[in-house]
Amino acid sequence: MAGRRALVTGGASGIGLAAVRRLAAEGARVVAVDQRPPPAGGPGVPYLTADVTRPDQVAATVNRAAALLGGPADVLVNAAGIYRIRPLLELTPAEWDETLAVNLRGPFLVGRAVAAALIDAGRPGAIVNIASTAALVADGAEPSAHYNASKAGVLALTRQMAVEWARHRIRVNAVCPGVIDTPMLRLMDDPAAGQAYLDRGVPLGRLGTASEVAAVIVFLASADASYLTATAIPADGGSTAI
């Protein structure tokens, strides 16, 4: 990733933070965006504060990141997201709207802004959107229709971005993490029940790590994936195969 300029949303924790660290370790210049402050002893990259659901803040942040990076970001990782558990009959319209705003409107706004800057500069680029296996399968144990719907939308958005921007040499792909050991994970609130779920539903029998997902993200953003666009890679320990 030497010479690449990367922008990562949701970069203060979980998969976003792991992506920031991996991109920086691979030689990219990185700017992270989050509503929270960076972690203590973090990766030592600039952090910008922004609400990815606000067009004005997104535009200002993408411009500020370009100034810090010395040019428009040619790698974007859309990792900002929220996860809420709520049965459908208890789900409020406000909860639905909040989740769709962060998880789907956010990637739309940030992706569009980054792509526009690359197109104006005549530069190629790569966008990696973080979806979820929740876009592919349902789970009655942790009901979250609003989250599932938002991530299914991310997959559709990824394909459309890829098709529309291919002529501008902008590749767009998605990663679908399964059960990953991040602060958003609720599965292991009950460790015994969580392990039983892993034994039953994940062929590899364990949680994934954020760094394992980050490795897939960096691959998709790299020249090694130069013929991949409009695809989604499950990083799920085999869970969607059973």
Image (cartoon, helix red, strand yellow):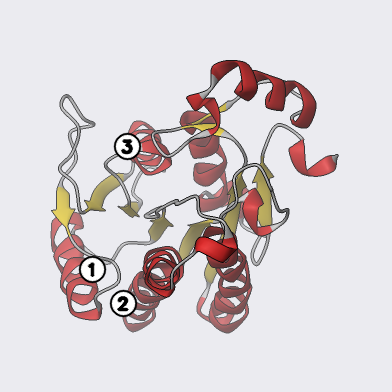
Q: Nearer the viewer, residue 94 or 198?
A: 94
Please report whichever mark, 3 or 1, sits nearer to the chain's N-terminal start: 3
Q: Residue under circle 2?
A: 117
Q: Residues within 10 Å of mark 2 (few under 14, many from 20)?
A: some
Q: At 48% from the left edge and 26% from the top edge, which residue is drawn?
A: 189
Q: Amino acid at mark 2?
A: Ala
Query: The C terminus lies in which quarter of the figure?
Result: top right
Q: Secondary structure at mark 1?
A: helix
Q: Residue under circle 1?
A: 62
Q: At 59% from the left edge and 25% from the top edge, which residue is drawn?
A: 207
Q: Name the outermost residue toward the top.
A: 192
Q: Is residue 139 above or below residue 199?
A: below
How far separated are the C-alphas under marks 3 and 1?
A: 18 Å
Quarter residue 13 falls in: top left
Q: Amino acid at mark 1?
A: Val
Q: Is residue 209 above or below residue 10?
A: above
Q: Residue under circle 3?
A: 24
Callout in the foreground (3, 1): 1
Q: Secondary structure at mark 3?
A: helix
Q: At 57% from the left edge and 83% from the top edge, which residue is drawn?
A: 164
Q: Is residue 107 above or below residue 206?
A: below
Q: Nearer the viewer, residue 222 or 60?
A: 60
Q: Is residue 145 left or right of residue 21?
A: right
Residue 236 at x, y = what percent?
A: 67, 37
Residue 120 at x, y = what percent?
A: 32, 83
Q: Is residue 172 visible?
A: no
Q: Secondary structure at mark 2?
A: helix
